[in-house]
Image (spheres, rainbow, N blue to C red):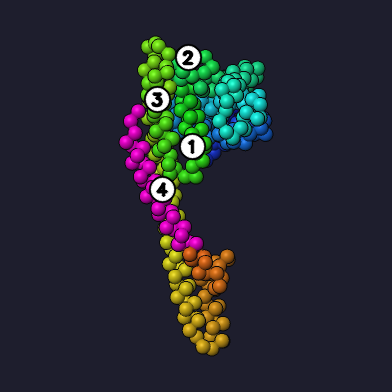
């Protein structure tokens, strides 16, 4: 597959489907036509996989390979019935067995296409678990490709986050707690030397927590910048309100009109003398809300740092 030489796989800003081969983009457009959420999920898993590979110090070539595998990991869902794929409630046991077939279906899709064949490990193995409790083959640690171990963690994390519909990283520690729990030995694991391995690779989960902390810190940084902007805006609104009060105290209509023109120099396109109180209150509410979010985000980081794998 020819990869654009100028594409930086480590920069999630550019990690979009237009950077992919035409054949892969065609397959993803088909997936999108069935379920837009699955398409977005595939892109999210690719981004997380990219960041995990970076933290794991994987080579650039292996990282590029893993990202494509991650994009394609759910490609087998093209052949899962829509009523099951888009069912809003919990699947029945029978429906879940059908859903599980997306791994082998994805493998078959890749093997039938020369351009997709190198990336079959993503679709085929991403639901295998180190302790043998995964599917479709119930493989244990030595037989599960490393790329699939990475994609499994990225997939589980994004699935949990999307299911809970987090609007920001607030509450994201709840998703990580579930992943950490799934990394511990399971009483349901089959007997054997890997029954104490847990489902997920501990080293990868540890790196996931670092990836999430980086994302939360980035969100905090962006929010702090926005709060600073709002703080300046609030000062401007207060100045305008002061001028409006002065204007209202004037007795002559001509003086008022002149003062109106003066006030307009401080207004932006969507603002008027009549709506400035409303605009100010909206900005104040947003300012207080963002400051509260920043505190909660810092609290999330504290929780994440205390998690032990």
Of badges 4 and 1, nearer the viewer stands 1
Q: Is residue 117 visible?
A: no
Give the overall secondary structure of the magenta segment: helix
Q: Give the secondary structure at mark 2.
A: loop
Of badges 2 and 4, nearer the viewer stands 2
Q: Residue at 52% across / 36% down in the picture?
A: 163
- Viewport quadrant of the C terminus: top left
Q: Mark 3 to mark 1: distance in Å? A: 17 Å
Mark 3 and mark 2 in contact (Cβ < 8 Å)?
no
Mark 2 lies on residue = 139
Tag count: 4
Which is nearer the N-term, disc 2 or disc 4?
Answer: 2
Mark 4 and mark 3 in contact (Cβ < 8 Å)?
no
Q: Mark 2 to mark 3: distance in Å? A: 16 Å
Describe residue 148's horizontal placement relative to residue 4 as left or right: left
Which is nearer the N-term, disc 2 or disc 3?
Answer: 2
Marking on residue 220:
4
Q: Residue at 66% across / 32% down in the picture?
A: 34
Q: Mark 4 to mark 1: distance in Å? A: 18 Å
Q: Give the secondary structure at mark 3.
A: helix
87 or 211, which is in the foreground? 87
Which is nearer the N-term, disc 2 or disc 1?
Answer: 2
66 or 1, which is in the foreground? 66
Mark 4 and mark 2 in contact (Cβ < 8 Å)?
no
Mark 1 lies on residue = 161
The segment highlighted magenta reads 282-309
Marking on residue 247:
none
Q: Mark 2 to mark 4: distance in Å? A: 40 Å
The image position of residue 298, as x and y in percent, is 36, 46
Q: Residue at 47% across / 45% down in the picture?
A: 168
Q: Mark 3 to mark 4: distance in Å? A: 28 Å
């Amino acid at each position: 597959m020819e990869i654009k030489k100028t594409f930086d796989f480590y920069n999630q800003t550019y990690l979009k489907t237009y950077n992919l081969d035409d054949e892969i983009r065609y397959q993803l457009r088909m997936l999108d036509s069935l379920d837009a959420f699955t398409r977005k999920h595939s892109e999210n898993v690719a981004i997380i996989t990219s960041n995990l590979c970076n933290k794991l110090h994987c080579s650039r070539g292996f990282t590029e390979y893993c990202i494509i595998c991650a994009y394609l990991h759910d490609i087998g869902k093209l052949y899962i019935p829509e009523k099951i794929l888009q069912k809003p409630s919990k699947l029945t046991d029978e429906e879940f067995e059908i859903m599980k077939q997306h791994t082998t279906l994805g493998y078959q899709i890749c093997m039938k296409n020369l351009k997709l064949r190198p990336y079959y490990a993503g679709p085929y193995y991403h639901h295998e678990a180190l302790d043998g409790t995964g599917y479709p083959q119930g493989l244990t640690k030595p037989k599960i490709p490393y790329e699939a171990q990475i994609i499994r963690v990225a997939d589980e994390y994004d699935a949990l986050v999307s299911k809970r519909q987090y609007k920001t990283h607030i509450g994201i520690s709840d998703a990580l707690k579930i992943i950490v729990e799934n990394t511990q030995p399971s009483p349901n694991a089959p007997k054997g030397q890997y029954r104490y391995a847990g489902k997920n690779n501990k080293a990868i989960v540890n790196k996931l927590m670092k990836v999430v902390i980086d994302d939360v810190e980035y969100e905090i940084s962006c929010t702090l910048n926005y709060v600073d902007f709002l703080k300046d805006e609030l000062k401007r609104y207060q100045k305008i309100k002061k001028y409006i009060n002065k204007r209202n105290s004037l007795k002559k209509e001509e003086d008022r009109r002149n003062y109106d023109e003066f006030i307009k120099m401080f207004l932006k396109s969507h603002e008027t003398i009549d709506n400035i109180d409303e605009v100010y209150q909206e900005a104040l509410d947003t300012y207080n809300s963002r400051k509260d979010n920043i505190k909660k985000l810092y609290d999330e980081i504290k929780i994440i740092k205390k998690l032990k794998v």
